[in-house]
Amino acid sequence: MMASNRVAARSVGAGAGLLLAIGLYLGLVVAPPDAVQGELQRIMYLHVPSIVTAYLAFFVVFCTSVLYLWKRDLRYDAVAVASAEIGVVFTGITLATGSIWGKSTWGVWWTWDARLTLTAILFTIYVGYLMLRSFAEDPRAGARYGAVLAIIGFLDIPMNHFAVYWWRTLHQPSSILRAGGPSVASVMLLPLAINFMGLVLLYAYFLLERFRLERIRHKTAEVRLKRGRKAYERERPMHAGESG
Amino acid sequence: VGHWGFVWLAYGVGTAVLSGYLVLLKGRLRDAGAELSALEQDGGRRTR
C-alpha cells in the first residue's frame, strides 16, 4: 500500500516536471511579448498559476478543516496541515514574483494596494496557522483551533478576488476568471494553462509527500504514547506502594 | 536590470523556492522515517 502510494506520488511528480518544462518553453520562448508590457508580461506565466494553485491549496484546507470539525478524524487534519504548508509556499512565490513585476512596471517593490495587502494577509494568516499547529501541545486542541482559524482565514480569498472591483487598485483586474471569458490571446493562454496544470500536479505531489510525513509523525507519537503507557503501568504498583 | 533580467529573477526565485521546499521536505521525511524505525526497533528489542 505504502509502496504503491509512493509510485503514484513519483508519477504525479514526473507529470508535473514534464508539464512545467513544456509550459516554461511555451511561455519563455514561443509566446510573443505583450504589446504594452513587452517581455515583462512573461512573469504572468508563473505569477498567475502560483496564486490559483495557492487558492486551491487553501480551499483543500478549508474543506478538510470543516470535515475535521465534523468527523474528528485526524486524517482530515493531516491533509489540512499538509495543504496549508504548500499553500504558503505558493503564496510566497506569488508575492515574490508580484513584487518583481511591480518593481519593473510600477517602479516600486511594494505598495499598500488592496490586492497586494490582502495577499500578504492571506500569507500571514496561514503562516500563523502553521505556527499555531507547531506550538500546540495537545494535537487534538491544535487541530480544533487550527480548523477554526483556517475556515475564517479562507474568507480572505473571495475578498482578494473581488478587491480589484471593490476598490481602486494599481493591480490589474482579472484577465482569466472574468465575466465574458478570458481577455488573454490563445497563444498566451496555452502556456498559462499548461503551467497551471503543472503546478497543480506539483501541488498534488507535495501534498502526497507532506501527508506521508504527517502520517509518520502520528505513528511515531502513537508508539511513544504506547511505550509511555506501558512504562507507567509497570511502575504504577511501585508508586502506589510509595504513596500508601 | 532589463526586462529579461526581471523575468529571469522571477523564474529564478520561483525555481529556488520550489526546489528548496522539495529538498527540505525530503530531508524531513528521511529524518521522521529514521526516528520511527529506531523507535520500533528499540521497542522490538525491549519486548524480546
Image (cartoon, coloured by chain):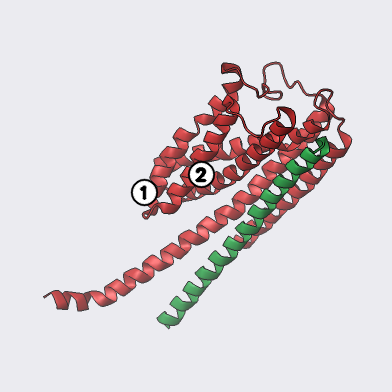
Q: Chain of mark 2?
A: A
Q: Is residue A71 visible?
A: no
Q: Secondary structure at mark 2?
A: helix
Which sits in the foreground, A33 or A228? A33
Q: Secondary structure at mark 1?
A: helix
Q: Is residue A197 visible?
A: yes
Q: Which residue is mark 2?
A: A127
On residue A29, the disc is none
Q: Which residue sits at x=86%, y=33%?
A: A31
Q: Chain of mark 1?
A: A
Name the quadrant of the N terminus of chain A.
bottom right
Q: Which residue sits at x=33%, y=72%?
A: A230
User: Tag 2: residue type?
Assistant: Val
Compared with A111, A10 (above or below) is below
Which sits in the foreground, A198 or A230? A198
Q: Position of residue A186 (x, y in %)?
A: 82, 26
Which sits in the foreground, A47 or A74? A47
Q: Position of residue A244 (x, y in %)?
A: 11, 75
Taking the image as shown, residue A153 lies to the left or right of residue A233, namely right
Whole-Å distance between the Cαs marked 2 and 1? 18 Å
Compared with B33, A69 (above or below) is above
Q: Colour of chain A?
A: red
Q: Which residue is mark 1?
A: A141
User: Tag 1: residue type?
Assistant: Ala
Callout 1 crowding tier (Cα within 10 Å): few <14, some 14–19, many ≥20: few
Mark closest to the chain's N terminus, 2 or 1 = 2
Q: Position of residue B19 (x, y in %)?
A: 69, 53
Taking the image as shown, residue A97 lies to the left or right of residue A224, namely right
Q: Colour of chain B?
A: green
Q: Which residue sits at x=46%, y=65%?
A: A220
Taking the image as shown, residue A232 lies to the left or right of residue A52, namely left
Q: Which residue sits at x=79%, y=32%?
A: A40
